[in-house]
Image (spheres, grey):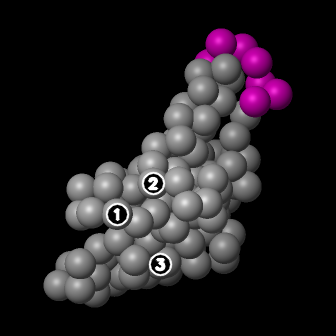
Amino acid sequence: WALSGFLFKADKANGLLTRMEEAVSGGNTSYKPNIITYNAVISAGANSFGNANIKGKAFKIALDAYKKVQLSQDVQPTTFTYTLLFKAIRKLIDSQHRQHAKESIAKKILEN
């Protein structure tokens, strides 16, 4: 979905991630999300388009996926993860808030 023309691609990708997490909680560890899964969700958010509400929700989905990676003991972000996150900032956040978001993410990267 990430590169599709589907308007609610971030919602769809996040829904799939949620179903995977629920399967793992139910004991099926073969559905455990990995960094590729999280990157796909972040990418779906970063490649979203539409009005401000759709973009805002897509950014929240991308950021929440990134936060799950940060909190995970099993998954580590890659350079691609950060590239996608910066793309989401560039495409989904209005210009007056963009610099603060970039600086905040950069600070987190340097802390790791």
Callout 1: SS: loop
Q: Earlier in the sequence, mark 2 or mark 3?
A: 2
Which residue of the protein is positioned furthest toward the top in this rendering?
26
Question: Mark 2 is on which residue type?
Answer: Leu
Callout 3: SS: helix
Please check the rendered image and state whether residue 27 is part of the magenta-colored stretch, yes or no: yes
**Residue 107 or residue 15, whichever sits in front:** 15
Q: Residue at label 3?
A: 86
Which residue of the protein is positioned furthest toward the left in this rendering?
96
**Residue 14 or residue 66, whichever sits in front:** 14
Q: Residue at label 1?
A: 50
Q: Earlier in the sequence, mark 2 or mark 1?
A: 2
Residue shown at 46%/63% (left/top)?
Answer: 48
Image quadrant of residue 103? bottom left
**Residue 106 or residue 59, whichever sits in front:** 59
Q: Is residue 71 above or below residue 22?
A: below
Q: Which mark is residue 7?
A: 2
Left or right, 88 with respect to 73, comes to: left
How far apart are the two marked residues, 2 and 1, measured between alpha carbons? 7 Å
Please check the rendered image and state whether residue 46 is part of the magenta-colored stretch, yes or no: no
